[in-house]
Amino acid sequence: MTGQDTRGLGRGLTNYGDPDFAIYLRKSFAKSMGYSDAMLDRPVIGIAYTPSGFNNCHRHFPELLEAVKRGVLSAGALPLEFPTVSLGEVFLSPTSLKFRNLMAMDTEEMIRAQPMDAVVLMGGCDKTVPAQLMGAASAGRPAIQLVAGPMMTSRHGDERLGACTDCRRFWAQYRAGQIGSGEISEIEGKLATTAGTCAVMGTASTMACIAETLGMSLPGTAAIPAVHADRLRAAEATGAAAVRLASEPIAPGRIITRESVENALRILLALGGSTNAVIHLTAIAGRAGIDIPLSWLNELSETTPVLVNLKPVGDNYMEDFFAAGGVGAVLRELRPLLNTDCLTVTGETLGERLATEDGPLDRRVIAPADEPLEPQGGLVALFGSLAPRGAILKRSAADSRLFEKEGRAVVFSSLEDLSARIDDPELDVTEDDFLVLQNAGPRSESGMPEAGYLPIPKKLSQRGVRDMVRISDARMSGTAYGTIVLHVAPEASVGGPLALVRNGDRIRLSVSRQRIDLLVDDRELENRRSRLVVAARDPGRLRGYDRLYAEEVLQADEGCDFGMMKPVSEDRSTGS
Ligand code: FES
């Protein structure tokens, strides 16, 4: 090997002004890890490896890594894992979304800076898969996603439990006084009992299905449970596939296209998937130079049926989805609506995959396209005077009796205000009111947390009220449900109309017209605007990543990516 080699360890040499010296030194140090010349002459497959003591969902990654390496070695390349940021959803403050872009930057730069011919992206927990796909799309090196797979369910009495729709269901019962502290502690130990990602069609599983539909992971791998032996076989096959990808080479830019993004939006809608996935897919597509206007989501939603009966919208869990046929079975139902010429990481097109694929199909979990669970997609974007750049409602998880409704606003100006007053017995609120939370968007101090699932005020929940219209610039966990309007853009902290709402204002929601309007006259709004003090943080008073985030984060309709991460014409990602 000389400094002229541009594959394997010869890629991207450390700059000493003498390429032959650089490769000699690199091989010498690599040999200190015990590799033979034969191994060091092979193509190199990097493995972005994200286990962490702060990430329960990835606790089986050591075993999964061994299987990936087996696949890479058997296909004739050298596997080398490297660590990146890992994001364990419930261990991060103020919220994991704030750090998704940090992980994406870390992933991108480590793929580009280190000598690898292709990369296996090992992720799973909510923000990790979007971060890895964003980074890989920008790095432009052949890449393949391997997800953690979902957790298994467990039992409490005669009930089946799985993180984390049931976490919220039991917590709501506890708040309403229907179960006591002893039982809620017992349930706490039963909600998440195996390795893997949340057991329902939350954000992690939605992103796994999107990755497979985009063509960035192997067919049939999104839904395999984390602890199933098939997950290890999928890992081995992913390692081998990465070697083939490197030899083609096929970079993400050939796979993540406008057509494959449309397919991904279709499956999101057919799954009744997580609202967070709209933000993440927008950010991933944005790295490939593809915009996703929310009007496009609505156009597709009109013609994409909901087919999958999984929590939080339906009855079943991810292990049932796997047994029922998984993503492939849904794609076969959607086939007339899909762009089948899209290339995938196997080198085949989506159409070629679907033509040869057959498998189990359980109609209790996956409905036929001509007898769908809902005729329209699970998500809808709303526009209007309260959300000029849009907002999202997961209509498949909402109470349709609240879809055409006008209500009185009960306003909380921040998360602190919400937690201080929501359970105040004196709070002036009825079940017909609209709960409004301000200053919880991407530029707020809280970094757009999953706080859009505002709790029902205790005095109402104790009377049996289960749902109300709730509106905010925050997000909602993919495992949550309710008539919840999210991602209002522009957000309150940058002076969006949401910041101008006051207690007692009237708001009109119309899902059929895709509208959300603040019924306050323009003069009064101008008056309020002239006195408004915006809550966005001043980047000049911040340092480090906080400062970068405050300066660069975009609004929800642009995927909350950093403005500076959009592709530029002479982008370094154009090479393979
Ligand atoms: Fe990791 Fe839910 S906490 S996927």
Image (cartoon, grey):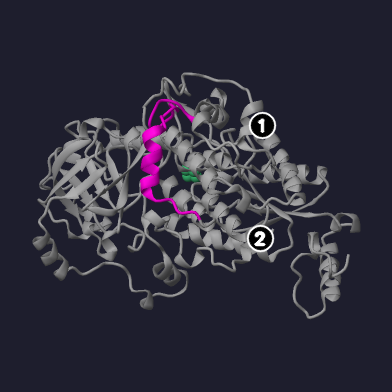
Q: Read off the residue under disc 1.
A: 230
Is residue 527 shown in magenta?
no
Determine the residue located farthest toward the bottom in the rendered image.
17
Is residue 311 shown in magenta?
yes
| Among numbered discs 2 and 1, the one appearing first in the sequence | 2
Residue 428: mark: none
Measured in 3D between alpha carbons, the distance from the residue under mark 2 to the one under mark 1, in whole angstroms, is 28 Å
**Would residue 300 be seen by someone viewing this image from the given angle?**
yes
Task: Tell me the kind of residue under disc 2.
Answer: Ile
Q: Residue at x 15, y 70 (%)?
A: 530
Q: Which quadrant holds residue 392?
A: top left
Label 2 vs label 1, nearer the camera: 2
Label 1 sits on a secondary structure element that is helix
Q: Read off the residue under disc 2.
A: 111
Task: Look at the image and give the residue range highlighted in magenta.
Answer: 290-317
Percent position of residue 385, x then y? 21, 53
Percent position of residue 468, x then y? 21, 38
What secondary structure predominates along the stretch shown in magenta? loop
